[in-house]
Image (cartoon, rainbow, N blue to C red):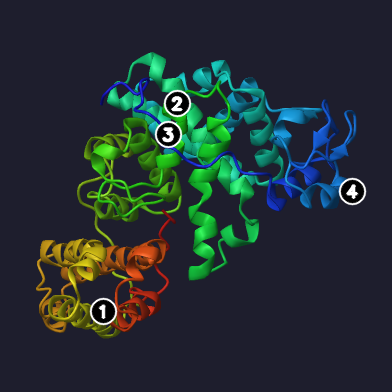
Amino acid sequence: MRSMLHASPLPDLPDPPGENPHYLRAISELGEQQEIVLHDDIYAKNGMKLLAKGARIDRKQFDRLVQHKLNISIDQALALQHTISATELAREASKVLEISTLMQQLATRSGDALAVKHELARLTLPPQLLTRLTVMRETRPELFQHSLRTAMIAFMLGQRLGLPAAELPLALMAGLCHDMGELHTDPALLMTEHRIAPEERRYVHVHPITAYCLLSDNKEVPPAVVKAVLQHHERLDGSGYPYALKSAQISDLGKLLAVADLAEAGSDRFESHRMDMLLRVSRNRFAPEILNALRELIHLPEHEQREVFADLDLTAELEKLAKIFDAWQSLKVFLETQADNTQHGAVDFLFERMDSIRSLILQAGFDPEDIHGIEAIAGDDAQILTELRDMLSEIDWLLRDLANEIDRRKPVVDGVSQVALSELVTHLRLTRLTGSCVIWPSF
């Protein structure tokens, strides 16, 4: 990989966002647990003084603060009684390594099992970032653990890839900060049991921009880290967000962080063959050399005997897939015979994604033009049924992700006949191939 220290120029994006109620609520909740005082006056954008220096922040101040846009980020005026330190981050990493066999394995195979803890203990973070990590740890512990584990995996991947020692702290910092924008997202939207509605997705998809704005306002954060945080949901094939960037447009640290985030989402949640499937699904979306490094760290077996799930209704699952291909064929006919060039170009990504799904079916040894005939080929052969189930699981995730991508690109696809698009989107949303057996991480 190229050096990550000298990132290309950062894009022009909005000024840092004003504090929103979700982050202010988190601070006020923390104020009930430890003393938080202001070391400076807080003013609204219109010049109105809201709180004076020395005031304590707790739930009593929440209603007053949330009604105004603040003239500075509230982090710049806070003094916490206790802020997380680099030493504590190292201790937290030790706990992760103690309880997670997989993380122990990653650390050992990275080349130096203790390096990640030692580097965390030496890491220098600006006070505002330490404040946000403290708020995250105390009010959103699951998000904090995800961020810490992602940082650790990013560091270990950097070790495995042979990055210079001077660049490894960048991977740690980017991992710790990559989801800070989610502190501005309604926690209810991010709960595992909540099914995000299409109109709610924009609130989730904006979190990389929110984090970028917060970090870029702090001159102590290296530009390479800021850019990687903005890009950690971008994908090489252009299917990511917030800007649908492609391969060369994504920084090296952004690519590294994306794989670390992927690995954390799947680690300790799947048995090895499911993790292997996750990496196979991702091969066209993430940097191959980084995926290979992850595979080496995880040391996935090439072959593993697996039990075929008894709850797989093969006929029903293939019928669902056939309906999607029928809907896609109808849309293709419309685009090729009735749509103008503008409409056709707006959905080029659909052709790419559906071609990827066809490719998966071909690679599994089945005919994508004869979905119904697949069942006859599989018969009662356990090995074929296992491969078929793996294929359907991969396709299931790709279909759900495609529906989300259509939502993200709504301003573009609005130029396409909604009648022609609606049937495909309906099937994408309704289809859940392989039932509830596989729960993929949210990318």
Residue where numbered disc 4 is placed: 60
- Give the label on residue 227, or none: 3
Give the CA separation, mark 1 to mark 2.
43 Å
Residue where numbered disc 1 is placed: 324
Q: Nearer the viewer, mark 1 or mark 3?
A: 3
The earlier-in-sequence mark between 4 and 3 is 4
Q: Residue at x 72, y 27 (%)?
A: 83
The earlier-in-sequence mark between 1 and 2 is 2
The answer to whether residue 277 is above or below residue 220 is below
Q: Position of residue 249 (x, y in %)?
A: 28, 39
Q: Quadrant of the N terminus?
A: top left
Q: Position of residue 301 (x, y in %)?
A: 24, 45
Name the amino acid, label 1. Answer: Ile
Residue where numbered disc 2 is placed: 223
Task: Please indicate, yes or no, whether residue 195 appears anywhere in the rendered image.
Answer: yes
SS assignment at label 3: helix
- Give the label on residue 91, or none: none
SS assignment at label 2: helix
Q: Quadrant of residue 71?
A: top right
